[in-house]
Amino acid sequence: MSAPQFDALPAALKSVQVRPLFVLHLDVKPIEIVGQTPGAFRRVGIVPSGTFAGERLAGVVLDGSNDWQTVRSDGSTRLDVRLLLRTDDGTNILMSYQGIRYGEADVLRRLDNGEPVDPARYYFRINPVFEAPSGKYEWLNRVIAVGTGHRFPDGPVYSVFEVL
């Protein structure tokens, strides 16, 4: 049995629809270097605060969040992030995501040095997952999300989208 050709699939299987969920800005302290480990070069970003805002939810990122990074041999950085969000109405929501940031060596060096870089010059994508309590935001528990990011000197900004 052969796989169907992409152009022969129904329209609903040929594209992905998204809608904006929120814009997330993280304040990140200077990166803490762990260094070369048996698996890869490791570093950690401590996230003391941040904000998120969208049509259906908005609020702040609480202190204690973090971004564990693996700098791989191909020059890409794999992100492993855990955030605690607090909505404007006081609900705590867990948000975790994996991500990849990759680009030409010069572009990544400029990012690491806090220099301005056009976000179109490198790849920076995430896949958030949420854990929300019962109530107003429990719908987040059933959302697949994707995001695209950009690294500013004080931390990243992400446009996060719900996949429909």
Image (cartoon, rainbow, N blue to C red):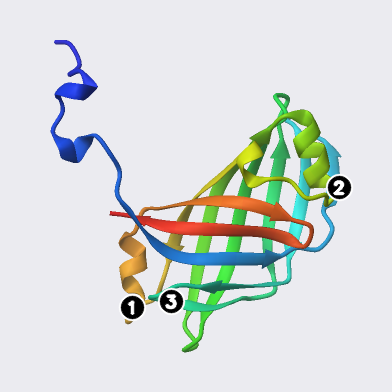
Please give the residue where the numbered disc 1 appears in the rendered image. Answer: 134
Whether residue 135 is visible here, answered yes or no, is yes
Residue neighbourhood size for the residue with mark 2, other residues' Cα within 10 Å, grouped as few (<14), some (14–19), many (≥20): few
Sequence-first tag of 1 and 3:
3
Residue at image location 51% in from the left, 58% down from the top: 159
Sequence-first tag of 2 and 1:
2
Amino acid under disc 3: Leu
Amino acid under disc 1: Ser
Local secondary structure at mark 2: loop
Q: Is residue 57 left or right of residue 63?
A: left
Instruction: Choose between 64 and 158: the one closer to the eye.
Output: 158
- Percent position of residue 150, x then y: 64, 52
Residue at image location 53% in from the left, 50% down from the top: 148
Q: Which mark is residue 113?
A: 2
Residue neighbourhood size for the residue with mark 1, other residues' Cα within 10 Å, grouped as few (<14), some (14–19), many (≥20): few
Point out the frontmost of discs 1 and 3. 3
Which quadrant of the figure has residue 19?
bottom left
Q: Is residue 61 left or right of residue 110?
A: left
Q: Is residue 147 left or right of residue 18?
A: right
Please give the residue where the numbered disc 3 appears in the rendered image. Answer: 57
Tell me the quarter of the image containing the N terminus: top left
Above or below 157: residue 98 = above
Above or below 155: residue 120 = above
Tell me the quarter of the image containing the C terminus: bottom left
Instruction: Choose between 109 and 43: the one closer to the eye.
Output: 109
Q: CA distance from mark 3 to mark 2?
A: 33 Å
Q: CA distance from mark 2 to mark 1?
A: 42 Å
- Percent position of residue 117, x then y: 73, 46
